[in-house]
Image (cartoon, rainbow, N blue to C red):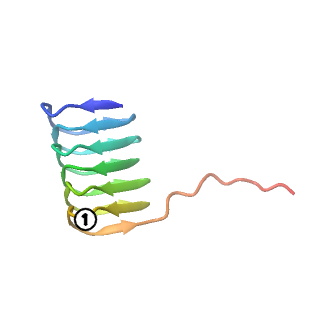
Amino acid sequence: MNHLFSNIEIQGSLTFSKALQMDGSIVGDVHSSGPLVIGEQAVIKGTVNTQSVVVCGSVEGNITVQDRCEVKSTAIVMGNITAATFSIEEGATFCGHSRVRMPSPPAETTLKR
């Protein structure tokens, strides 16, 4: 897993494809085909679009994930969440709308008899 440490601040978009643990801050959008963990000290001001996300820190912007979005008790989310599955722990702050939708169907397969 890649790690963006707490002393790192990014102004601009961040794109990655592998798992990332983020403890720094970013003012810009985050895009990934991999999973993202937003640590307790992390701050994102922008949209998040990833495979899955675990939010322990702060996000000011919309979150869209293909799979699962977990909002932990230490999290602050100010924005809308769209995910296939969504969980939020007691104590978390969430100000927005959530939309839970079916995950993308698997590729069509032909049944043989």
Question: In this picture, is 50 found above or below 105?
Answer: above
How busy is the neighbourhood of tag 1: few (under 14 within 10 Å), some, or many (20 plus)? few
Which residue lies at the image location 43% right of the left edge and 53% below the top edge? 66
Residue 84 in which image quadrant: bottom left
Query: Residue at (37%, 36%) from the top-left corner?
Result: 19
In the shown orientation, is residue 33 left or right of residue 90? right
- Quadrant in which residue 97 is drawn: bottom left
Q: Quadrant of the C terminus?
A: bottom right
Q: Quadrant of the N terminus?
A: top left
Q: How many marks?
A: 1
Looking at the image, which is closer to me, 11 or 19?
19
Give the percent coordinates (x, y) of residue 25. Answer: 15, 40
The residue positioned 76% from the left and 54% from the top of the image is 110
Identify the residue at image location x=12%, y=31%.
7
Q: Is residue 1 above or below residue 49?
A: above
The picture places residue 87, in percent across and down from the top left corner, at 35, 62
Q: Position of residue 44 (x, y in %)?
A: 18, 47
Can you identify the residue that label 1 sits on?
Answer: 90
Q: Locate residue 109 relative to residue 15 in the image: left or right.
A: right
Secondary structure found at label 1? loop
Q: Amino acid at mark 1?
A: Glu
- Which residue is nearer to you in this view: 60 or 1? 1
